[in-house]
Structure formats: C-alpha cells, structure tokens
Image (cartoon, rainbow, N blue to C red):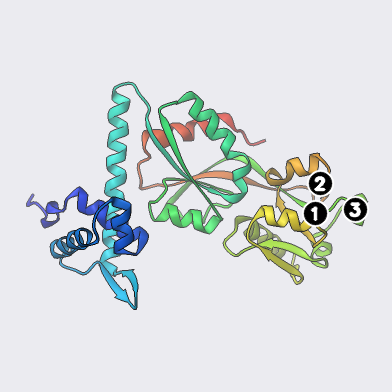
C-alpha cells in the first residue's frame, strides 16, 4: 500500500493542533505547552500545508475550526486515544493495570460515583482519574467527540452507536420543605405538583428529560416552573420554600434522613429509571476502562 502523505504529520504537531482546538487561541495554546506563539503558529502552518486545507479561520478576533479542522480534530483525538490504549496494553503485558480512567458523569450521579471510583482506585493504585461532571447532553457530547470513553448517565440516547449497560437504580422522588402541608398526603399526583411552583433543571439535563417524558405520558402541562442550573441549587430553593421538585433520590437521601427535606409519595408508585454506563460501540475501550466497567457491574446491582 502506498503510504499516505499524512504519514509525515508528527505527534508534536497533533499535540499543538489539539491544544489550539481546546483553547481556540494560539497564545493560550502556546502558554499551555510552554512554547512561544510564533512556534505554535509555525507548526500549524506546516500541518495545514501537509493537509492541504486551512484548519482554522478568524471571525473577528475569534479562532474557529474549519470543516477540515473538525475532521482532523476527530482523527487526532482517535490517534491520541489509541496511543493511550497501546500504553495500557503494554503495561498489562507486564502484569500491571495503569493509566487514566477518563470518565464523564451526569450531575445526578455525582452523589454516588466518587465512592465507587475511590473503591476502584484502592484496588488499582497505579491508576489516575479524570472525571468531568456535567448535565446529560454535555456528557453525551463529550462521548461523541471522543473526549471521554465512558459516560455515566440516567437516560441513554436512542442511538445504536452507543452501547449502554444499566447498573444501578435511579429512583426519582418529589421533595418539599418539611413544613409543606402535603407531607401527610397518601399520594401526590404530577397534576398537583404542576399547580405549585415546580423547580426544574436546565434543558439538556437528564432529570428534566425524565420529568418532561412523564408529563407527556400523563398529559400534564408544566406551567409554573422555575429553572435552576444544578441539583444543589434546586434543593436549596426547595428548603427555602420556593417550590417543589422531582429529583434523583441519590442527591437528597441525606437531606431527607436528617429532616431538611421530605419526600412526597408519588401517585402510581416510585418513579424508577436506571443509571447506565455508556460507551461508543465502535471504540475499543482501554484496559483501564474495561476493568472499571467490570468493577461497576460487579459492585452495583439493579434491584
């Protein structure tokens, strides 16, 4: 097979290119890599000459990635990840499990995942961890962009390209301040909740997605809503008497136990979903991620 002209691209050029992609700024990329700005610009010019297309363009003072740049960015991330995998596989041949667990966690899962990760790291002391916490849509974007190879989310996408494995119950509960008059009711319906101020997450949140699906199923229109950017902000607002909310039990279990919040029994029984581990089918997981996935499935059971 005739070698591709792209074989002349160096790993250093890939590193510099991805730094510019991350920062969208040549000077910031230079600072990150301890280089001069002219050195970064020169490497990008050489890379563009090899590729035969501009990789960046200026719109005002903003650096934007071109269509060719997007193609190169995906390939560069794949290449870096493949090298990481090779490094881990070589370590595994020597009988060691080492490397970085690179994982994105939906914000509702941040209340139980640190304990799982700590237990995993206690068994594998040579492993380092990089965890990103964001809402559902942001974590899925990081998965599709090859920035994380594993994602923990409560609502997997309807996409055959994504492999998902349920591993833990995700029960959602309606919460109110302890003095709320509904605390003594046998059941509270979604229709009742919708007539009160209902505190919800931002678009892209898995909790909001589940709530909106439930509202469609029961033909309930959510009218009096207040939007908050985090579960902690929602809990604080509920405690202050701003309204009611439906949130994952994992995020408020301790608040309920100490009496800071009360759980209102929902009509039709508990609202249950599952926390899932997600990864792209086409992507071979690193040995570290494979080991962590096995660990999670063994440590947590749906029930």
x 27%, y 41%: residue: 83
- The quadrant holding residue 192 is bottom right
Image vertical order of residue 101 relative to residue 45, above or below: above
- The earlier-in-sequence mark between 1 and 3 is 3
Image location (x, y in percent) of residue 161: 42, 52
Dot 1 crowding, Cα within 10 Å, few <14, some 14–19, many 20+ = many
Q: Please provide percent x and percent y for residue 286.
A: 36, 37
Measured in 3D between alpha carbons, the distance from the residue under mark 2 to the one under mark 3, in whole angstroms, is: 10 Å
Residue holding disc 1: 239
Helix, strand or loop at label 1? It is helix
User: How far across and how far down the image is residue 174, in percent?
Assistant: 78, 53
Check if mark 2's residue and mark 1's residue have beta carbons within 8 Å: yes
Cα gap from disc 2 to disc 1, whole angstroms: 7 Å
* Label 2 environment density (alpha carbons within 10 Å; few <14, some 14–19, many ≥20): some
Q: Which residue is mark 3?
A: 179
Q: Earlier in the sequence, mark 2 or mark 1?
A: 1
Residues 171 and 219: in front is 171
- The answer to whether residue 107 is left or right of residue 16 is right
Q: To which residue does mark 2 refer?
A: 260
Q: Residue at x 12, y 53 (%)?
A: 8
Q: Residue furthest left?
A: 2
Q: Secondary structure at mark 3?
A: loop
């Amino acid at each position: 097979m005739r070698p591709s002209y792209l074989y002349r691209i160096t790993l250093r050029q890939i590193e510099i290119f991805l730094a510019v992609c991350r920062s969208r700024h040549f000077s910031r990329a230079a600072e990150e890599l301890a280089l001069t700005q002219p050195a970064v610009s020169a490497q990008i010019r050489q890379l563009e000459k090899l590729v035969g297309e501009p990789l960046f363009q200026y719109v005002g003072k903003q650096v934007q990635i071109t269509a060719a740049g997007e193609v190169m960015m995906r390939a560069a991330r794949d290449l870096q990840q493949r090298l990481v995998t090779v490094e881990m596989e070589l370590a595994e041949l020597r009988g060691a499990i080492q490397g970085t667990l690179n994982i994105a966690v939906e914000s509702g899962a941040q209340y139980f995942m640190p304990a799982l990760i700590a237990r995993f790291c206690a068994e594998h002391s040579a492993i380092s961890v990089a965890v990103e916490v964001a809402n559902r849509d942001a974590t899925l974007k990081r998965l599709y962009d090859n920035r994380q190879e594993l994602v923990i989310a409560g609502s997997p996408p309807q996409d055959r390209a994504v492999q998902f494995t349920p591993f833990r119950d995700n029960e959602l509960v309606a919460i109110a301040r302890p003095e709320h008059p509904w605390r003594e009711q046998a059941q509270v319906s979604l229709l009742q909740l919708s007539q009160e101020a209902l505190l919800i997450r931002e678009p892209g949140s898995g909790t909001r997605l589940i709530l909106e699906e439930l509202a469609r199923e029961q033909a309930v229109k959510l009218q009096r809503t207040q939007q908050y950017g985090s579960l902690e902000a929602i809990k604080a607002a509920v405690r202050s008497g701003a309204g009611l909310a439906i949130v994952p039990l994992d995020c408020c279990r301790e608040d309920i136990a100490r009496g800071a919040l009360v759980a209102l029994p929902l009509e039709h029984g508990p609202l249950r979903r599952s926390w899932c581990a997600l990864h792209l089918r086409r992507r071979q997981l690193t040995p570290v991620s494979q080991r962590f996935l096995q660990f999670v499935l063994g440590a947590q059971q749906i029930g």
